[in-house]
Amino acid sequence: MKNLKSMLVAVVAVLVLTAPAWASPQTVTLNVSGMTCPACPITVKKALEKVPGVSKVDVRFEKKQVLVTFDDAKTNTDALVKATTNAGYPSQPEKATN
Ligand SMILES: [Cu+2]
């Protein structure tokens, strides 16, 4: 019985120590200087929405910015930048996340 109890304690300790950080939604602002006409944001938005983990894309065309909300367990800022770049719109994160 004593062994079982200490084993349980050990298992719980391992779970606590190795549990992955819970996924939390992150928002990043991407500066997309190539959005020069009102049709551009549609392309950028579609490219970002295709990235797994992206839950919201909010284009601020007048500021040439895109606000992207994503699950940081599934994707990251680099992947978002790549997605817009591959669509023909290189972007830069306004500030680094994590
Ligand atoms: Cu355009």
Image: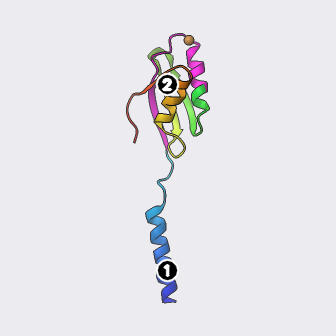
Q: Indicate left or right for 50 with 91 as reference.
A: right
Identify the image quadrant of residue 93. top left
**Residue at far top of view:** 37
Whether residue 30 is in magenta: the answer is: yes
Give the quadrant of ligand 1. Answer: top right
Q: Residue at x 62, y 32 (%)?
A: 50
The spot of residue 95 in percent (x, y) is: 37, 32
Residues rendered magenta in the picture? 25-46
Of 47 and 9, the residue lying toward us: 47
Residue occupying image coordinates x 43% and y 64% = 17
Q: Residue furthest bottom?
A: 1
Viewed as shown, does residue 28 lie left or right of 87?
left
How crowded pointer 2 is (Cα within 10 Å; few <14, some 14-19, many 20+) is rated as: many
Asked if residue 65 is positioned above or below residue 14 in the image, the reply reads above
The quadrant the C terminus occupies is: top left
The yes-or-no answer for disc 1 within 8 Å of ligand 1 is no
Element at label 1: helix
Q: Does label 2 or label 1 sit earlier along the sequence?
A: 1
The residue type indicated by label 1 comes to Met
Tell me the residue that label 1 is attached to: 7
Where residue 43 appears, as percent x and y from the top left, is 59, 20
Q: Tell me the kind of residue under disc 2.
A: Val
Residue 84 shown in magenta: no
Name the residue tied to disc 2: 66
* Residue drawn at (51%, 32%) of the image: 80
